[in-house]
Amino acid sequence: MRESNRLLSIVHRELGKSIRPGMSTKDIDKMGEKLIRSFGCVPNFLNYDGYPASICVSVNDEVVHGIPSKHRYLQEGDIVSLDAGLIYKGYHSDAARTYAVGSISPEAQKLIDVTRQSFFEGIKFAKAGHHLHEISNAIDSYVRSFGFGIVKDLVGHGIGTSLHESPEIPNFRQKTRGIRLKPGMTLAIEPMITLGTDDVEWLDDDWTVVTADGSLAAHYENTILITEGDPEILSLEEDADPMTGIIIRRA
Ligand code: MF3
Ligand code: CO
């Protein structure tokens, strides 16, 4: 799981550096698939339930599962969410990031920052002895303090020798405690946050999830390992701050 996610963190780092206005969402998918295969790994999203690409590329009001297209070009001011995963020696990784395309509005940047930080607020409770829903509740409290929407129809998940394992990990307040966390559990925690409503709809392609009100959405996800102490964030970029996920770009 460590190696699978370390390799995935490199994929995200490279894709993140490549984002620019004028590229197509298919360009991102091609680059990601090539990199994954260059590691001798397999993209786990490709053909998953019939999903036709390796990287999910979701622009602006698209929340997740956008299908890459050679006709869809990124434009200055867009935000773009990239969700990717791979299989290394039978072990799955899964992580997502939202990036600015060129210069974006302050509101869009705030959404990206709050979404990323909500993950870090949640994982403060991701350690042995805590209960799963402490993570959900912490994400909820943080995000609602900004008045943003939380997508409820999609959730995080356990991950291991399959992409999606139990438990489900909601990003909104729960009435129960959920399971007790144990060392060795690997979880994909993935807040999907909007500038407007919690509600989402599916496009006619049966994959692309969009906000019901057309507001912008962001996504941030890492695969983590539960330990007795702080969790290991297995898919975090090597050059990211471990407390905030902010990339420290070196020359
Ligand atoms: N990354 C998604 C998740 O977190 C899965 C992508 S669905 C797929 O669950 F079909 F694209 F694989
Ligand atoms: Co996931």
Image: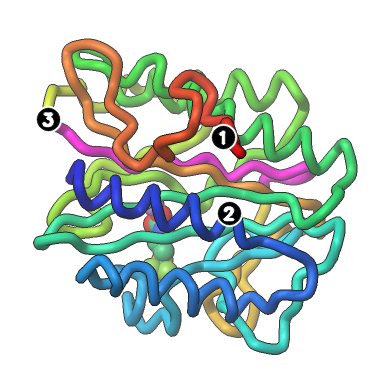
Residue range of the region highlighted in magenta in the rendering: 185-198
- Sequence-wise, the earlier of marks 3 and 1 is 3
Tell which of 189 and 172 is nearer to you: 189
Disc 2 vs disc 1: Cβ atoms closer than 8 Å?
yes
- Sequence-wise, the earlier of marks 2 and 3 is 2
The residue at which mark 3 appears reads as: 184
Answer with the quarter of the image where residue 189 lies. top left
Q: Nearer the viewer, mark 2 or mark 3?
A: 2
Which numbered disc covers residue 247? 1
Q: Secondary structure at mark 1?
A: loop
- Is 194 in the magenta? yes
Answer with the quarter of the image where residue 136 lies. top left
Q: Secondary structure at mark 2?
A: helix
Which numbered disc covers residue 16? 2
Q: What type is the residue that disc 1 sits on?
A: Ile
* Distance from Cα at disc 3 to Cα at disc 1: 27 Å
